[in-house]
Image (cartoon, rainbow, N blue to C red):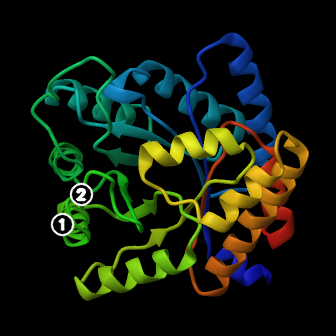
Amino acid sequence: MNRLARNSLKLSFEFFPPRTEAADEKLRGTIERLRLLRPDFFSVTYGAGGSTRDKTFETVMEIREMTGIDAAPHVSCVGSAPADLTEVIHNYKKHGFDHLVALRGDLPSGIAGGGTLRHANELVELIRRETGEHFHIEVACYPEFHPQAHSAEQDLENFRRKVEAGADSAITQYFYNADAYFRFLESCSSLGIGIPIVPGVMPITNRDQLVRFSEMCGAEIPRWILKRLYDFGDDLESIRGFGIDITIRLCTQLLDAGAPGLHIYTMNKAEASEAIWAALDLS
């Protein structure tokens, strides 16, 4: 990939807020390594019902101070009152942030109800109403469709509502079938959705973790990949090698066919992202 092509891509990494001092230190090491790859931004997730609200803020502040690279905090609306969300949004604006990832989110386990905002488009509307065009707003989308959607058509309509509410770009749930992504783009185009849709990529490094996550979020692991992963048994090195190779092939296919960038779900680790960047000559 030539330098011009690299400069035209939107490249980013996602972290989750650490919960212990040891995890804090590990994430700092990951950030120090991944900053050298010069991504466009780092994003930091927001726990169910805002459970990591303060830690998300602390983490994006630290990323910006450590790297000078744009940090985009996630904000989710389910389980949070509009007044609380307004406070969060204005706090980020006050501290000089201009990039948010706006999500519906999930309720913490055992908690019923979800505040008065139920959908991500309502959160996007709130952000625009409170801050105008100050923030670049990312939203989520699902090439294999949200597991709670009653139909593909309904899920596409939900996505269109987020775009019409004022989203600037979107990041997909991870997937391993490039055709699903490109067919999704075609469907979006037919609905008049023209914002950039960056594929989210989950490097395969841990089989059991991947299976657990995929069951929760509805992402399909192709049968042939899953079979190979189980064939390796407890050989973690072989699982990781095979998984990263599969991920690199997927990224190559996506970029060669015109995807506008890559958003890597790092799981707060650097090695897989470094391998992908090196193989794709993205540094």
Q: Looking at this view, is 121 or 237 the one in front?
A: 237
Dot 2 and dot 1 residues touching (CB under 8 Å): yes
Residue type at numbered disc 2:
Ala
Crowdedness near tag 2: few (<14), some (14–19) or many (≥20) residues, C-alpha within 10 Å: few
Residue type at numbered disc 1:
Gln
Q: CA distance from mark 2 to mark 1?
A: 6 Å
Q: Position of residue 175 (x, y in %)?
A: 54, 63
Counting residues from the N terminus, which is met first, the one under dot 2 or under dot 1? Answer: 2
Q: Quadrant of residue 153?
A: bottom left
Q: Position of residue 246 (x, y in %)?
A: 75, 66
Q: Which residue is mark 1?
A: 154
Residue 131 shown left or right of residue 244 in the figure = left
The residue at the far left in this view is 116
Quarter of the image that includes the N terminus: bottom right
Q: Looking at this view, is 71 or 182 the one in front?
A: 182
Which residue shows up at 52% across the image and 81% down it?
179
Which residue shows up at 57% across the image and 28% down it?
59
Q: Which residue is mark 2?
A: 149
Which residue shows up at 21% across the image and 45% down it?
123
